[in-house]
Amino acid sequence: MAKEIEGYLKLQIRGGAANPSPPVGPALGSKGLNIMEFCKQFNARTQEKQGQLLPVLVTIFKDKSFDFVIKTPPAAVLLLEHSKLKKGSAEPNRAKVGSVTWDQIKEIAELKMQDLNAFKIDSAMKMVAGTARSMGLRVKGTAPWAN
């Protein structure tokens, strides 16, 4: 018989760096979960993604046990890594701060495909390109589907 779900909790934690201090400790502690057990499991499962910001969806069960799913890093974080910038533009419609190529956008879209609401790679690329534009990044070249 399946366990009864009490609720969900969404967190963003750096890979391999979960510890009981805020924001992880208070968020899990308020739900009555074993904080150290979560930290051990999360750090073990994210050793190869050391330092990357990872969204986590924690499923909380009635018996205070939990399960969690680690998602891919946010598109904005991946775009900043590829463009080698610290942050996006304060005025993305006026001031462009950097650029990415369609090849980089395709790479990010392929990585994020499982978490995006898209069936085709072209649709995923359009979503990532939209995120890039809203951050003040130019997309260099012509779109692959425009040829």
Image (cartoon, grey):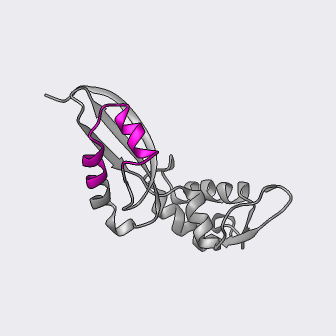
Q: Is residue 77 magenta?
A: no
Above or below residue 2? Residue 24 is below
Q: In this view, does 124 lie to the left or right of 25?
A: right
| Foreground pick, 39 / 135 | 39
Kindly identify the residue that appears in the image at 30 percent across and 31 percent down.
32
The quadrant the N terminus occupies is top left
x, y percent for residue 17: 39, 59
Kindly identify the residue that appears in the image at 63 percent across and 56 percent down.
126
Instruction: Looking at this view, name the residue that lies furthest to the left.
Output: 1
Quadrant housing residue 78: bottom right
Q: Is residue 10 left or right of residue 86?
A: left
Kindly identify the residue that appears in the image at 80 percent across and 65 percent down.
96
Q: Is residue 39 magenta?
A: yes
x, y percent for residue 81: 58, 70
Instruction: Looking at this view, name the residue that lies furthest to the front.
Output: 21
The quadrant the C terminus occupies is bottom right
Quadrant housing residue 30: top left
x, y percent for residue 135: 71, 57
x, y percent for residue 124: 55, 56
Q: Is residue 35 left or right of residue 147?
A: left
Give, as a single range, the part of the protein colored magenta. Answer: 20-41
Total count of labels: 0
Q: Is residue 80 left or right of residue 28?
A: right
| Foreground pick, 83 / 38 | 38
